[in-house]
Image (spheres, helix red, strand yellow):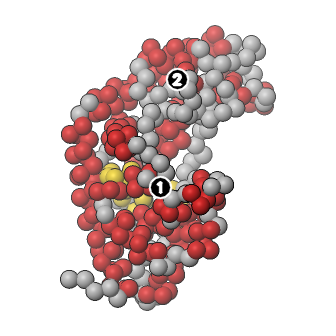
Amino acid sequence: MRIVSGIQPTGNLHLGNYLGAIRNWVRMQDEWSAQGGECLYFLADLHAISMPHVPAELAANTREMVAALVSCGIDPDRSILFNQAQVPQHAELQWLLNGTARMGWLNRMTQWKDKAGKNREGASVALYTYPVLQAADVLLYQATHVPVGEDQKQHLELARDIAQKFNNDFASEEKPVFTLPDPIIPPEAARIMSLRDGTAKMSKSDPSDMSRINLTDDADAIMAKVKKAKTDPEPLPSEKAGLEGRPEAANLVGIYAAMAGTSAEAVLADFGGKGFGAFKPALGELLVERLAPMAARYRELRADGEALDAILAKGALKARALAVPTLNATYAALGLVRG
């Protein structure tokens, strides 16, 4: 059993990133390592260059992401944590799979249409072939399972189509080159909204820092942001139905429930009828209790660039060892002669 999952290295990680993705990675690491399985988590820096980027920022964000993942609970001794650029087999396998992938398949990718927008002629080739690299990312390691959200289901289906066609064309049924990975649908992630607008997702691109809880925020910053979060004048309802039409109230209750590992109904059972003057301090204290240790660990890690590079190098060494046999088998199946 082997899980493979990647995340693009972006800066300014916030509460939404943690509850939406990183916490699930930690949960899977703990569950799968206990069962003797493996988890490979990579920073998708090769994917990042499919869009305009600033090289120095990409390098800094990659190290920042390593620090964030480790501070949130990813253990480099129990999971394989690396960045794509240090495992050239990702790019090699993508090229080999380009011979199997079909234009019609890529033309149907909804994320290509969304990201390219109306200026498709001006989009990079890398953005168009992005899904083939995603297929290489998981097929390279004979992944048995890949966690996917709604927006990634189509890409995993493409990876399976490419693997199946390659096996049919160049391998035998008894000895396929690639494992067809199955999807894992993670527990429903909390949808975390802006602290200033309950109808907009929490985002690092929001110009107001008060709109988000950053993973680097200290206890004072967290408490200040929660206390100034937008709300309405009504007390909290006793039942979840009472949150309809109250996006800011629903958001704060949802954050509390996600951090406490409980349900919105349970939160309202405790706080129903109380005003935000009572609820906000309780929410702030909960966030400080859970996030402050992560923030302290993050700041410690981020200050040691050599240690972060060592973590990536260690993970890349392990990843390359797993990748080489699959890549060699792919070359051989295609009849490509290598010395």
Label 2 – label 1 distance at C-alpha: 28 Å
Query: Could you say whether the residue bearing mark 1 is in a helix, strand or loop?
Result: loop
Q: Tell me which residue sits at (45%, 64%) in the image.
A: 133
Left or right of 86, for residue 109: right
Tell me residue 195's x, y (percent): 61, 24
Q: Quadrant of residue 269?
A: top right
Say what amino acid the circle numbered 2 marks.
Asp
Query: Could you say whether the residue bearing mark 2 is in a helix, strand or loop?
Result: helix
- Tell me: residue 88, above or below residue 67: below
Q: Quadrant of residue 57?
A: top left
> Which one is nearer the viewer's eye here, 69 or 260?
69
Left or right of 136, for residue 198: right
Q: Tell me which residue sits at (49%, 32%) in the image.
A: 14
Quadrant housing the N terminus: bottom left
Tell me residue 316's x, y (percent): 27, 56
> Which one is nearer the viewer's eye here, 57 or 131?
57
Residue farthest to the front? Answer: 122
- Tell me: residue 162, above or below residue 73: below
- Tell me: residue 260, above or below residue 306: above
Residue farthest to the top? Answer: 277
Q: Is residue 194 visible?
A: yes
Quadrant housing the C terminus: bottom left
- Tell me: residue 332, above or below residue 72: below
> Which one is nearer the viewer's eye here, 127 or 149?
127
Left or right of 80, for residue 191: right
> Which one is nearer the viewer's eye here, 227 or 187?
227
Q: Which mark is residue 50?
A: 1
- Residue on which disc 2 sits: 209
Q: Tell me which residue sits at (44%, 51%) in the image.
A: 48
Say what amino acid the circle numbered 1 marks.
Ser
